[in-house]
Structures are given as C-alpha cells and as structure tokens.
Amino acid sequence: MPGKGISKSQIDQLDIDQLRNLQKELAVRTVEKTVDRLEELRSAHTALLAKIEKAVAPYNLSARTFLASTRKDVAEFMLERMARNVPDLQVAKPAAAGRPRRQRGRGIVAPKYRHPTNSRLTWTGRGHQPDWITKWLDDDHSRTLKQLRT
C-alpha cells in the first residue's frame, strides 16, 4: 500500500490485536463507501427513470413497461402508432443473406386479437389490419393494440 497511509513495514510492526482492529476499521470504511456509492447510483437511477418516463409518455407507456419490453416489442409498437397516422405505410424487410430458406406451409393460425364487445371479430395479426381495429384505435387515441390481445 505505498503512498496510501500505512506502509508495509508499519503493518509488519503491528501485533495481532492491532491488525484485527485495523481489519475491522477497513471493513467499516468499505461498507460506508459502498453505501455512499449505492446512494449515488440510486439517485442516478431515479433521474434516468424520470427521463425515460418523460420520453415514453406520448406512447402511453411507463418507464418500467418500456424497460421490460424488448427492442422488437418497442419497434412493433412504434410502427403500429405510425401506421395509424399513415395508412399506406409499409415497412420493407431486409433482404435475407445467404441461401434462401425452404418455404413451409402456413396452416391455420389462432387469432391474436379479439374485439372487446363482438367476439366474432378477430385478427391473427397477419396481413392487413382489419377496419374494425383501425376504427377501434381511432375512436380513442389512448387505446393500444395490446388491449385487444387474446
């Protein structure tokens, strides 16, 4: 520990009780510094959560919901919101690299979305968004597609 208080030769001169006392004092100081650092990190965490809350508020999300989402979930959510404002918005998929994959039969897909009052109106989430979903979302802009998930 050269240059930091006690030299090695000074430590060598301490008896066992003095070393134990020094060890206890070091443990206490380590805990104090760790607690101070933890308080700093908590303060920074709170400030960061407040910034995230403010940024995601226009999308009717909380910071915790946003942070629990994957990037894919967030991208899908934002595309849904943009698609409501621009009906012919189409997102191009990136070209597949390498060998093309073998196409498989699609089969029957269970519906992912169901109208809240008319259970006969459903949508699998594939293809063009049905008019009833667009109308339902446009009636109240605080509504999200997640509210219709089955």
Image (cartoon, grey):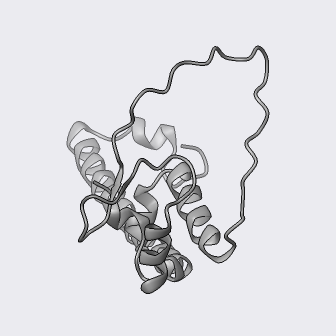
User: Position of 41 compared to 23: left or right?
Assistant: right
| Drawn side of residue 63 relative to residue 75, left or right | left
Residue for point 42% across, 47% down: 124
Image vertical order of residue 115 relative to residue 138, above or below: above
The C terminus lies in quadrant: bottom left
Percent of width and height locating residue 28: 28, 58
Q: Viewer-proximal residue, 136 or 64?
A: 136
**Among all residues in the image, which is located at the extreme left?**
17
**Dividing the image into 4 quarters, which one contains the N terminus?**
top right
Depth check: give the residue in front, 44 or 66: 66
Please state the horizontal and vertical placement of residue 71, each as a whole percent of the image.
55, 52
Picture coordinates of residue 109 (x, y %)? 39, 36
Q: Residue at x 47, y 77 (%)?
A: 135
Q: Residue furthest front?
A: 120
Total numbered badges shown on the rendered structure: 0
Image coordinates for residue 53, horizontal then vertical, percent = 47, 78
Instruction: Work out whether residue 98 or residue 33 is closer to the camera in this orientation and state it.
Output: 98
